[in-house]
Image (tube, rainbow, N blue to C red):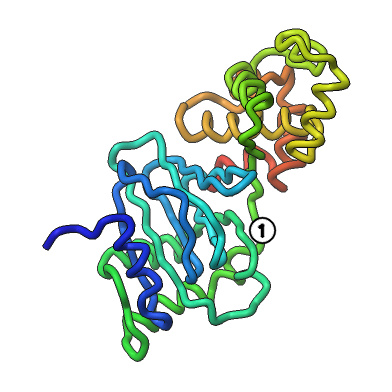
Amino acid sequence: MQPLSSAEQFVEIDRHRKSVYVMHQKAERRFPVHQHKKAQLSYVEGGIAYVHFVGNTFVIPARHYIWIPPGVDHFLQVRQSETAVVRNIYYPDDNKHIFYQHTGIYPVNNLLYEMIHYTENYDENVEPNSSDYAFLTAIKSILPNLSPQNVPIVLPTTTNERLRPILRYLYDHVAQPLTLKSVSQKFNIAERSLSRLFQTVLSISFLQYLKQVRMVRAVELMLQTDQTLSQIAFETGYQSISAFSNTFYQLANMRPSEFAQTIR
């Protein structure tokens, strides 16, 4: 049987309103920007993933999943491992609990890991009134209790042609002592104009964006290297582990040492 194309799979996800749709895909397969009428749980095994939304990119570290409510434009990109597998479960929009109404990234404990991994026994539509359906809906029902804390590792994005090369430069040079003055001189833009550009386009300050891009890079280094936290702090532009730890805590609601434990 020929595998379904991306367009055909999108149709299948929403074809049966009450079913739960399960799809396991290799990381090499990339979907275009899309949305669906069902909510989505995605867990990536063996890699770091980025889910791109309009205006934001969410970073999904190892041992974490993302919950996406229905009707949200997005696409998923996976890096790091050729053997990575994305486990997607699409649920009918039939629960009004506030947890299910917002996009979020959450850690996966051992129980949830085993339950999600077990879904490799399913593929495509699972209809109501079956034990398989009951198992899949049990995963959904325990999420609010197992996932009390969202890990907001988010990086604002834009299509603004003036700002995009500046954002790329910040990402590529996070280890350097970047300042509003040095970056404005690099791109021949007045400091006040650059500051206004960040506020107008991204709705955050230059300094806040710099903090966020450094934390995204720190998470990537935690996942992709064996460097110590002190080395990662230095690689992301911090001269002390305490300054790095405090900034990480401000953005992720946990210390980097705590976060490192969740991804092992």
Out of 128 and 47, give the one closest to the viewer: 128
* Residue drawn 50% across the image and 57% down it: 108
Residue 110 x/y as whole percent = 45, 60
Out of 211 and 115, give the one closest to the viewer: 211
* Residue drawn 50% across the image and 73% down it: 140
* Residue drawn 74% across the image and 21% down it: 240
Q: Is residue 18 visible?
A: yes
Instruction: Give the image quarter of residue 71.
Output: bottom right
Q: Relative to 259, is 65 above or below?
A: below
Q: In the orientation shown, which residue stands out farthest toward the front?
A: 161
Callout 1 crowding tier (Cα within 10 Å): few <14, some 14–19, many ≥20: some
Residue 103 x/y as whole percent = 61, 59
* Residue drawn 56% across the image and 25% down it: 228
Task: Classify residue 157 as left or right of residue 33.
Answer: right
Out of 118 and 205, give the one closest to the viewer: 205
Residue 17 x/y as whole percent = 42, 80
Three-letter amino acid code at the position of disc 1: Gln
Q: Is residue 230 visible?
A: no
Q: Relative to 23, is 44 above or below?
A: above
How many marks overall? Answer: 1
Q: Relative to 50, is 232 above or below?
A: above
Out of 218 and 92, give the one closest to the viewer: 92
- Image quarter of the N terminus: bottom left
Q: Secondary structure at mark 1?
A: loop
Instruction: Report the residue marked by disc 1.
Output: 149
Residue 164 x/y as whole percent = 63, 27
